[in-house]
Image (cartoon, grey):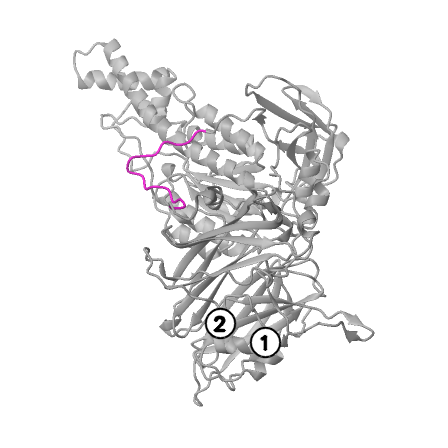
Amino acid sequence: MLREIKILRHSSRIAPATSICGIVSRFRGWFTSTILSCTIHMLTRPSSSSVALVVALSFVATYPLLGTAQTQRQDPKEQSDVVRVFTELVQTDVMVFDKNGEFARDLKREDFELRIDGQPKPIEFFERIIAGSGNEELQLAAARGNGGADKSLKGAIPLDRGRTVLFFIDDLHMDLAGTALTRRTINKFIENEMGQNDEVAITSASGQLGFLQQLTDNRMVLQKALERLRPRSTTVTDMERPPMKEYQALMISRYDRDTTDYFVDALIREIPGLARDSATNMVLTRSRQILAQGSNITRNTLIGLEGLVRNSGKLPGRKIVFFISNGFLLDGRNSDTAERLRSVTSAAARNGVIIYSMDARGLVPTLSDVSFAAPFDPSGRYERSLSGELAGTQDGMNALARDTGGRPFFNTNSFATGLKKALNETSTYYLLAWKPETSEDSKSRFRNIEVKLINRPNLSVRVRRGFYDVDPTPTVAPKKKDAKPETKIPPTPIKPSNSELLTVIGAPFPERGVPISVSLSHVNNLAKGEMLSTSMQVPREFISFGVDGIKSKAAIEVAGFVYDDRGRAGAKFSERIEIAATNQSAEVNNTTDLKDIIYTFPIYLSPGLYHVRVGARDVASGKAGSAQGWIEIPNTSAGQLTLSSLLIGERAEAIIVNGVPSKGFNDDEVSWNVSRRFRRDSFLRFLVFIYNAGRGADGKPDSAIQVQVIRDAQPVITAALKKINSDGISDLARLPYAAEIPLKDLPPGRYLLNVTVLDRVTKQSFTQRAKFEVY
């Protein structure tokens, strides 16, 4: 439905100003605790990194000028996902499809038969779940037998959370053609299939993507990661003749007579007079060396995949991992590959991960081609020894998919179809839970899961193979001598007490012990250039009193780091914020007369892509949380049309008493909203600056702006294109525009604010976006 977006009355009354601070100061209290406050004290000092030109540190209005966004209290306990052993229940997810591949939605508890290690188990919990919904985590918590979880989590999770999609590229087993196909496939997903609320990570077995291997909803970051993807296939070295491929070495280790005889005969021809037993031993030794090299490469791949799966357990709900590879061999005799697969399977079960395997070689009838110098062999034995190579290299990928509840996509060049099918069929599932066996044995055992349908032969069941009842210690891949060091939080002399906080900040995925929010904003300052401002918000519910033995005192430690897209750290900040209770009840419930803490860190830097990690720790409780985000700082000095970030605030609706607003109400009060969560009875107000708008024949800009609010790729509010009024603005290179959106008619959920500026002089356009949530 088209709704009018009311332009702020301040916009038509902006007096001439020579700086951004001068303009914003006329918005009468707008963003008084934001990055644009002219009272921020800027600390200028040389930076040791090329990332930061100037480091500025400021805590703005911690008390009493605290933010007003409200956050529901969450259960601080770690919440895991599908198949985890608890003292109450164990659970697993099950997908059921009809002959057309459609999900069967009408099943009941009595339609299922559950067996663990062949023994029937009563189903204690049964429910159909929609993946990515706000209720998913509530249902998972209920299936664990976690009493009270509904109350603690209700309202804390968005109604349309979105999907978590992880791409693991096995570039250790991938050639140039496979790399190109992989890049095209993922890029199509980013452009066409990635939803508004989806979060995606692109990772590789070699780690070549470096700092860009992070979960994000930023399409630009994902596309930059794809640009860095290069063929890194680690081939097995074999200089002897005739060449022995890894698959042939595997066949020899399995005592395949035809393959072994071929290489023994070839060796005897090469060395006349060599005894056959000696030749056989030499061939066996050669095959073991080749298999050792190949097994080490495969082991590194599986350890990297297992690490990704385990780390994803911090993320809510079901996760989908697309494992893309040219295939690898399963060598149970000479390596621990089979055990590695079981570890990945168990980790996927415990952390709610489904794996879909994709063969990056596409549609190939055989792996023999002109690039491989096959020896002359009239007998055909050499060619026969490679007849099962394609299927052999797909066995491990097939096991990864089938054993985790997914499926493989082999022998096809249409990966995009497979991606879409996988996302569709994992969108809904049944959740089954049962009571575990009570045992004092702490030894790890792999438990096999079997689920059948009773009297429903027309349906097929897809379920996980099993899990370890006691999680084995994960293996860490050994570092290569020539490998680049991992990007970590650098050593810092901040404070010894912050070591725990630094660990949380450096974690692969955000920690939610304290559910903090972060907002990254960019504006251009006429005198100093591009400014990035990092604002973080700590919910008041997680502020605990009782620090240093003083019941009326609370303290929060905050810290953060700024990185460029290569992972080089530049600016950092650290602060201890102490809060005194204003009344006696505050020290009891930690909420009375308290508002969320908002901390702002501004910094001037050069244009580029930057990553920011922040964390907060409540000193009294020891609970900590982290958040992270990406932002691109444009080069406004280049003269091209561009926009600042959307600076978003919240204005409360007037409380009417006897026909007049309540005493003390000020309709000009707008609170800086870091969490981007808004009450339905409030108004979203935003401010944006248009840089480098073209000038017409009269010397004035001729630019128009359009505002949209989008949900799930569908516009729910679209304003008419409106010309931007530049009357009274002295600095026409920085045009301010502000507007307000009433939220009362928007259903609860997550939205995208889309602001597009059209420059009619230069025929350019620029769009800036920001996500927000209505509750």
Closer to us: 164 or 542: 542
What amino acid is found at the position of numbered circle 2 in the picture? Cys
Rendered residue at 43%/84% (across/down)? 695
- Label 1: element kind: loop
The magenta span reads 475-490
Residue 81 rendering spot, x and y as whole percentages: 61, 37
Image quadrant in which you'd find residue 436: top right
* 130 with respect to 771 (left or right): right
List the residue tagged with mark 1: 28
For the residue pair 261 and 66, the one nearer the viewer reads as: 66
The residue at which mark 2 appears reads as 38
Magenta stretch encompasses residue 478: yes
Q: Position of residue 416 (x, y in %)?
A: 50, 48
Indicate left or right for 492 with 774 as reference.
Answer: left
Residue 510 rendering spot, x and y as whole percentages: 52, 46
Question: Residue 395 — which label?
Answer: none
Quadrant location of residue 346? Answer: top right
